[in-house]
Image (cartoon, rainbow, N blue to C red):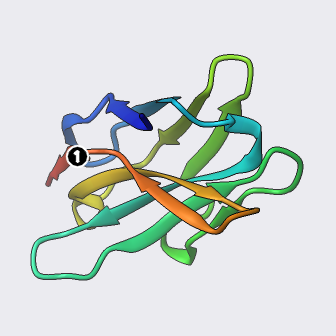
Amino acid sequence: QVQLVESGGGLVQEGGSLRLSCVASGINFSFHRMGWFRQAPGKQRELVASIISRGMPNYADSVKGRFTISRDNAKNTVYLQMNSLKPEDTAVYYCNAFNTIIKINYWGQGTQVTVSS
């Protein structure tokens, strides 16, 4: 059974930082592109950042220079370091695992990030 378990969300003031973590189980972690998506109320889910086992990370323009995605294949964990947070970063953040071979997506349950002004 595939499980993606996120942690690290919460309430932070504008300009603050948070670090999200996502631990994956039930998958061959290194075969998966790992990513973070977010969904704000009334908006579509959007890609924040993604990373494959070997390669440069990919970021949405809105978070470039502020967010950093990283992964630890030995721990089956992907991280999202979020700095200089803005109120518009407020959303539910979802961990995503995409199997690049059989083209299947897996999702975590989401973690709320709220940035107050």
Which residue matches tag 1? 113
Q: Is residue 93 left or right of residue 49?
A: left
Q: Residue shown at 68%/49% (left/top)?
A: 32
Residue 73 screen position, x and y as percent: 73, 27
Q: Is residue 63 visible?
A: no
Q: Is residue 66 left or right of residue 43?
A: right
* Neighbour tally class for label 1: few under 14, some 14-19, many 20 plus, Cα within 10 Å: many
Q: Is residue 62 left or right of residue 5?
A: right
**Furthest residue to the bottom?**
43
Query: In which quadrant of the rendered view does residue 76 lie?
Result: top right
Residue 12 screen position, x and y as percent: 21, 37
Quadrant in which the N terminus is drawn: top left
Q: Is residue 116 visible?
A: yes
The tally of labels here is 1
**Furthest residue to the top?**
75
Comparing 109 with 11, the one in front is 109
- As drawn, 115 above or below 70: below
Q: Amino acid at mark 1?
A: Val
Looking at the rendered structure, the secondary structure element under dot 1 is: strand
Q: Residue shown at 73%/18% (left/top)?
A: 74
Comparing 65 with 69, the one in front is 69
Comparing 107 with 90, the one in front is 107
Residue 100 screen position, x and y as percent: 73, 62
Residue 67 screen position, x and y as percent: 54, 50
- As drawn, 10 above or below 66: above
Q: Residue shown at 45%/33% (left/top)?
A: 22
Q: Residue shown at 32%/74% (left/top)?
A: 45
Q: Is residue 117 left or right of residue 113?
A: left
Quadrant in which the C terminus is drawn: bottom left
- As drawn, 14 above or below 72: below
